[in-house]
Amino acid sequence: MFTRIAHNLAKMGFFPTDKKTLDCIKRALLPSEGCTVFDPCCGEGLALQELGNYCNAGKTLGIEIDNERATIARASCTDVVTADLQDCILPEQKIGLLYHARS
């Protein structure tokens, strides 16, 4: 197995969003106070929290597959579910910002 692939598997695909990328995202947003920000792969919740604060969000919702990272994210986000996104059914509701960065 290639080292890069092995490293990705060990981290379960966890690659935190860097500050430069977050700054670019924030410049592209027209925040709506009280909106809901949703991150389907929130990791430790740092990007979700920062975007939520920037948007003055009413709620920050996340899904994280890794229990340890989800526990960390719960400390700073409104609601975080430990699950695989593919196993989740999202109710029909208004989400102001769906955030998902790809590496």
Image: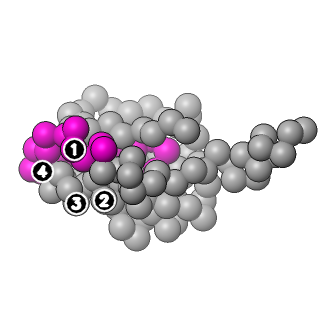
* Amino acid type indicated by mark 3: Asn
Image colouring:
one colour
- The Cα atoms of the two marked residues, 3 and 2, are separated by 5 Å
**Pointer 1 residue:** 27
Toward the viewer: 25 or 100? Answer: 25
Q: Magenta region: which residues?
A: 24-42
The answer to whether mark 3 and mark 2 are in CB contact below 8 A is yes
Mark 2 → mark 1, Cα distance in angstroms = 13 Å
Mark 4 vs mark 3: in front: 3
Comparing 91 with 22, the one in front is 22
Instruction: Residue lying at the far left in this picture: please name it.
Output: 33
Answer with mark 4 or mark 3, whichever residue precedes in sequence: 4
- Measured along the vertical axis of the image, is residue 20 above or below residue 53? above
Numbered circle sitting on residue 34: 4
Numbered badge on residue 10: none
- Residue hosting label 2: 50
Looking at the picture, how far across and down is residue 102, in whole percent?
Answer: 50, 36
Secondary structure under tag 2 reads helix
Please give the name of the residue rendered at 9% of the width and 50% of the height, measured from the top-left corner.
33
Q: Which mark is residue 53?
A: 3
The residue drawn where x is 12% and y is 50% is 34
